[in-house]
Image: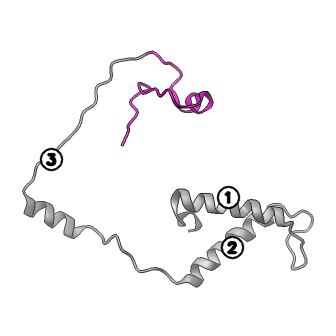
Amino acid sequence: AIFRLRGSFSSQNTSSAAHSAFSSGTNTPTDVTAILGLAIEPLPTIAAQIAQLPSAVQKPGDPTVLAEKVVKHLFNYVSGFVGGSGVTPDSAVPMGMIARWYESFVGKVRAGGVGFLE
């Protein structure tokens, strides 16, 4: 992992737009003190702590619940673009709008999973 400490990291590969968006504004190198903690413990203690952690493998939820959340997300997205008296069963939705929603949805799922559907 790379950690940035008060703007002291600079990369030659980053674009100027990305660099300016994530920089502190000054590019002058400064001394930075980092404190790193390290605990050395006996293996039985570590094993006991690991045993208390929740299992990473979880039973998959009901697929119909996930499908319902996805459709609600689509409905909320589309209803934001429908003018007039609101969404009716006869409201027309351009396919391009659904394509934009899909691209955005897939990007969110790739970036952080389906937690945003909660």
Residue 54 appears left or right of 71: left
Q: Is residue 83 magenta?
A: no
Q: Residue at x 55, y 29 (%)?
A: 19
The residues tagged by marks 1 and 2 sit, at their Cα atoms, a distance apart of 15 Å
Q: Residue at x 40, y 33 (%)?
A: 4
Amino acid type, residue under disc 2 in the picture: Lys
Residue 37 appears left or right of 93: left
Using the image as rendered, state which of residue 25 and residue 13 is in the foreground: 13
Identify the residue under disc 1: 104
Amino acid type, residue under disc 1 in the picture: Ser
Using the image as rendered, state which of residue 10 and residue 53 is in the foreground: 10
Residue 9 image position (x, y, % from top left)? 42, 27
Image position of 70 with respect to 21: above or below: below
Are dots 1 and 2 in contact, CB under 8 Å?
A: no
Amino acid type, residue under disc 3 in the picture: Ala
The quadrant holding residue 81 is bottom right
Using the image as rendered, state which of residue 79 and residue 11 is in the foreground: 11
The residues tagged by marks 3 and 1 sit, at their Cα atoms, a distance apart of 42 Å
Q: Secondary structure at mark 2?
A: helix
Are dots 3 and 1 in contact, CB under 8 Å?
A: no
Identify the residue under disc 2: 72
What segment is highlighted magenta in the picture? 1-28
Color style of the picture = one colour
Residue 42, label in figure: none
Identify the residue under disc 3: 39
Q: Residue at x 59, y 84 (%)?
A: 64
Image position of 63 with respect to 15: above or below: below
